Image (cartoon, rainbow, N blue to C red):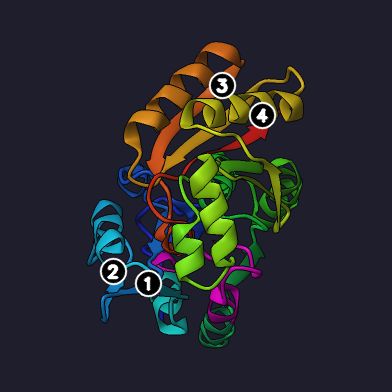
Amino acid sequence: MPIIDAGAPTPVASLVVDSAASLPADVSLRHPTLRIVPMRLTIGGVTYDDGKDITTQKFYELLQRHPGTATTSAPSPAAFLEAFEDLGRQSRSILCIVVAERFSSAIDSARSAGVKFSEENPDHEVCVMDSLSAAGGQGLIALEALKLIEAGKPLTTVVEALERVADRVRLLAFVDTLYYLWKGGRVPMIAHAGARLLHIKPTFELHQAQIATVAKPRSTRKALDRLVRLMKERVEGRAVRACIMHAAAEESAHLLHERIKREFDCRDSYVTEFTPVMGAHLGPGMVGVGFLPE
């Protein structure tokens, strides 16, 4: 049972996220009220804890050597329970923000752990929230949660605010190739062959757990241009916070980052590696941006 240190300052709430949020590596060090629970990655017959046993960069290197073999799975309830018990020693309220239920069963594991934790610790509360997003979108929601928690807001206020944030967060991204989607059985061979022949970079949007194809530019440069244009259409001149993501495409990501800082009223931004939870199916070369208009 978690025992709160009576001599230490007690945060009003703490935060748990799964590693699909693609948060920068130093975030946990800067925020003691945060725990990141790793997703499980299997490739080449070996299973790893995301960000713990294997780096994102190493994962994409292995993916190129073992295309079509990568699978991902949610953290176990025990992994979430361990995080809840750890944070329960410093606060009585715990918020857990997970990748969209459409993409993973992480929410089921978190809920199961939350029930067990609450039964064992009736003076604590756990709230599990579906981010309706992933990667940079989920990460932006988590960072907003940290701001509210560290400002001393109660859990109910934090959750209400984040529900509004989740409605505004969007993610735009393009893939370098449909090869990995084809190898994984998610698109037909003809789609992969056509995209390769025409140098098409299929561009997708994720909003409220729904994915749609929004453009089919014919080069990386045009794909970056299209991301900026689509983002402008959705931001409509408002200030914005942005997370630029990439899967083994750091140069393109930094080019996109510089354009966003130059062409938007960008209040905050960072570059991070794209979560293997989705990158396992999309492959290296993906570049995208999660953004939150104010």
Disc 1 and disc 3: Cα gap in Å? 36 Å
Q: Nearer the viewer, mark 2 or mark 3?
A: 2
Residue picked out by circle 4: 231
Q: Nearer the viewer, residue 107 or 86?
A: 107
Quadrant of residue 171 in the image?
top right
Q: Amino acid at mark 1?
A: Ala
Residue picked out by circle 1: 70
Which element carries disc 2, helix, strand or loop? loop
Q: Is residue 42 above or below residue 281?
A: below
Instruction: Give the image location of residue 237, x and y in percent.
Output: 73, 17
Q: Nearer the viewer, mark 1 or mark 3?
A: 1
Q: Nearer the viewer, mark 2 or mark 1?
A: 2
Q: Nearer the viewer, residue 177 or 7?
A: 177
Q: Earlier in the sequence, mark 2 or mark 4?
A: 2
* Dots 2, 1 in contact, CB < 8 A: yes
Q: Residues within 10 Å of mark 2 (few under 14, many from 20)?
A: few
Residue picked out by circle 2: 66
Disc 2 and disc 4: Cα gap in Å? 34 Å
Disc 1 and disc 4: Cα gap in Å? 31 Å
Q: Amino acid at mark 4?
A: Met
Q: Earlier in the sequence, mark 1 or mark 3?
A: 1
Q: Nearer the viewer, residue 40 or 164?
A: 40
Q: Nearer the viewer, mark 4 or mark 3?
A: 4
Task: Give the magenta part as a residue range.
Answer: 85-111
Which element carries disc 4, helix, strand or loop? helix
Disc 2 and disc 1: Cα gap in Å? 7 Å
Residue picked out by circle 3: 267
Disc 2 and disc 3: Cα gap in Å? 40 Å
Q: Amino acid at mark 2?
A: His
* Dots 1, 4 in contact, CB < 8 A: no
Which element carries disc 1, helix, strand or loop? loop
